[in-house]
Image: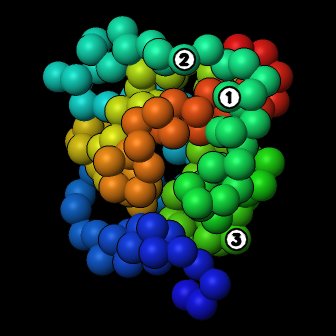
Amino acid sequence: MRGFSLPVCLSVVLMLCSTTSHAIDPAGYGQPGGEFDIRIPRVPAADLAAAKRQTPPIAATPEVLAEGKAIFLGRGTCFQCHGVEGKGDGGAAKVLPIQPRDFTNPAFKKLRTPGEMMWVLKNGSLGQSGKVPGTGMLPIVGQFLSEEDGWKVLLYERSLGGGD
């Protein structure tokens, strides 16, 4: 794993060691374009309503988006899995059984709220909902980034591909 950051290496190890069963068979999701179904929330049902209500405490100004991009491409290491353009095609994506989220997909932005995205940044996406297998997305906010930086990154992610 030379050249990859600690979060990426840990996520790959977690994915390779995971043996949990899933309500939805993830077969085929490791192929190019194999992003898991965007209609299925990553947030557990018990937390979903609260996550959906949460809104960014900062506006998506050009300055905030520039800071979010810098974090995405830098110390946040988001690009390692999500790719430099946010399409889910980063270098580490090649070894993940489920492709990382494509933030340029306008349908994703319509279905998933900023609050849900923050929940994933805080809690990871390791299969907590019971409906989807873990993706290897580790908790980033509170571990590697502050909550403010997390909002900047997700606002930048939501700006990719236009819209929102």
Residue 45 appears left or right of 9? left
Q: Position of residue 67 (x, y in %)?
A: 68, 39
Packing grade of label 2 (10 A; few <14, some 14-19, many >=20) is few
Please tell me whether mark 1 sits on a helix, a strand or a loop: helix
Furthest-front residue in view?
A: 63
* Residue in front for this viewpoint, 32 or 101: 101
Query: Which comes before the other along the chain, label 1 or label 3?
Result: 1
Q: Nearer the viewer, mark 2 or mark 3?
A: 2
Q: Name the residue rendered at 77%, 55% in the picture.
A: 84
Residue located beneath label 2 in the image? 58
Q: Position of residue 149 (x, y in %)?
A: 51, 39
Q: What residue sits 55% from the left and 87% below the top? A: 1
Residue at point 49%, 38% (across, down): 150
Q: Are marks 1 and 3 in contact (CB under 8 Å)?
A: no
Q: Quadrant of the C terminus?
A: top right
Residue 110 seen: no
Q: Sequence order check: which comes first, mark 2 or mark 3?
A: 2
Q: Is residue 6 depicted above or below 84 in this figure?
A: below
Residue bearing mark 3: 91
The correct choice, above or below, for 32 with respect to 60 in the image is: below
